[in-house]
Amino acid sequence: MDSFLIEGGVPLRGDVIIGGSKNAVLPILAAALLTKDPCTIRRVPDLSDVRFMLEILKSLGAETRFEDGTVTIRAAKVKGFGDYELIRKMRGSICILGPLLARFGQARVSLPGGCVIGTRPIDLHLKGLAALKTKIKIENGYIDARVRRLTGSTVFLGGRAGPTVLGTANVMMAASLAKGITVIESAACEPEVSDLAQCLVSMGARIHGIGSPTLTITGVEELHGTDYEVIPDRIEACTFICAAAATRGDVIIHGSRPEHFAAVLDKLIEAGVRIERKAGTLRVTRPGRLKPTDITTMPYAGFPTDVQAQFMALISLAPGTSVITERIFESRFMHVAELMRMGADVAIEGPNAIVKGGRGLSAAPVMASDLRASAALVIGGLAARGKTQVHRIYHLDRGYERMEEKLRGLGARISRVAGE
């Protein structure tokens, strides 16, 4: 397995362009199954998760092409049965369920996999689809769903940790071709969900309340093709901002939408990071010492769980005590042990991580456990004294396009070491 070798202590300086959103593009690619017409999706990041999704679509019979950040999909002849081995490897693959049901009235897909960051049941997906008159069975690792005709209904998709993002996406896609009107209460409000909704509208769907917790979808007889551009990746933007601040750098972020991560910017400013907005860019500097601060992960528009690990790496450099509370996933502190290997002082008490910062970090060999934990360890390595080797970076390749190249463009001393 490949690893990153990082020589830390070098301030990041320069400009970086943020790519398309991983969490938005996966359901948008799945939405191409809703029509026989060709769909062109632009600003698609070249990630292993994207490649996986395209393989899944091809296994269903779709024709796909991926070149220079643009994906073209033609799903004229597809089937309702997904490849078990492909689908089980990636949680985002569950979003093919709604489109297949809407298109064929049946779907048989494997239960999905993904990062090991806690239990992420799909019960709300199934609840929402069942409300549209779908009969669902789970056996032998498969979800077997069938419906004579999807019929609109009202469904509540709030869960223990808030609304379900992919569940909202699945029900919204299915409802776009259902008979009648579907109302999703407690719908996820994340920008990625709104981006999918806008893509569906560009295909002819009738969706009202986009960006709000109540979505009203009036089903149509058919959808047509589209030419659509994906929103920028807010998590990638936040990751590079944390990296710039951790190294006391001076970095200009291009192509992001700051309104999508206002909660993160608020906490970064509170921690002593200077953020200057100018002409569609963000300039990130750290004029003085970091200050301790507390965060709690929440559904949008709160602080995103996908930035918690990166923020922890940064705030471990702040003198004083900070408290990070994880309210979304119960096992999303797996990066803590590896950060402690680098000298971070972190104590876990239930959903809280108490971070006593200010001692600085030192290089160490560390092991990535999931996508965002990997990013946190890279940030730690960039800020640490000495050479850090981050193992299992295949996690990073799932969600960050050419990360080492972008960091080298900012002056980082980072290289990819090929595994055996």
Image (cartoon, rainbow, N blue to C red):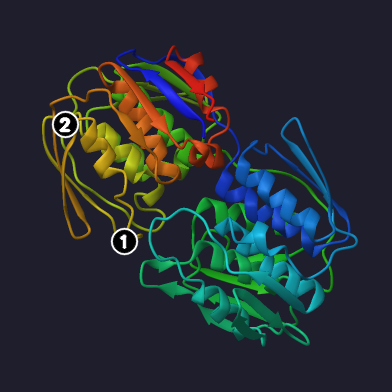
Q: Quadrant of residue 177?
A: bottom right
Q: Is residue 129 visible?
A: yes
Q: Could you say whether the residue bearing mark 2 is in a helix, strand or loop?
A: loop
Which x, y percent locates residue 302? 35, 53
Tell me the crowding category of disc 2: few under 14, some 14 to 19, or many 20 or more residues within 10 angstroms, Cα based: many
Q: Which mark is residue 291?
A: 2
User: What amino acid is at disc 2?
Assistant: Lys
Which residue is at a point 39% across and 58% down the rendered structure image? 299
- Out of 197 and 330, give the one closest to the viewer: 330
Tell me the crowding category of disc 1: few under 14, some 14 to 19, or many 20 or more residues within 10 angstroms, Cα based: some
Q: Which residue is mark 1?
A: 330
Left or right: 136, with 265 as reference point: right
Which x, y percent locates residue 406? 52, 21
Q: Which of labels 2 and 1 is toward the front?
A: 1
> Dots 2 and 1: beta carbons under 8 Å?
no
- Out of 220 and 326, give the one closest to the viewer: 326
Q: Is residue 266 above or below residue 92?
A: above
Q: Could you say whether the residue bearing mark 1 is in a helix, strand or loop?
A: loop
Q: Is residue 295 above or below residue 82?
A: above
User: What amino acid is at disc 1?
Assistant: Glu
Which residue is at a point 74% across and 85% down the rendered structure image? 147
Left or right: 195, with 164 as reference point: right
Left or right: 202, with 367 as reference point: right
Which x, y percent locates residue 168? 56, 67
Position of the C terminus, as image quadrant, is top right
Q: Which mark is residue 313?
A: none
Left or right: 27, with 115 as reference point: right
Q: Quadrant of residue 133?
A: bottom right
Q: Quadrant of residue 318?
A: top left
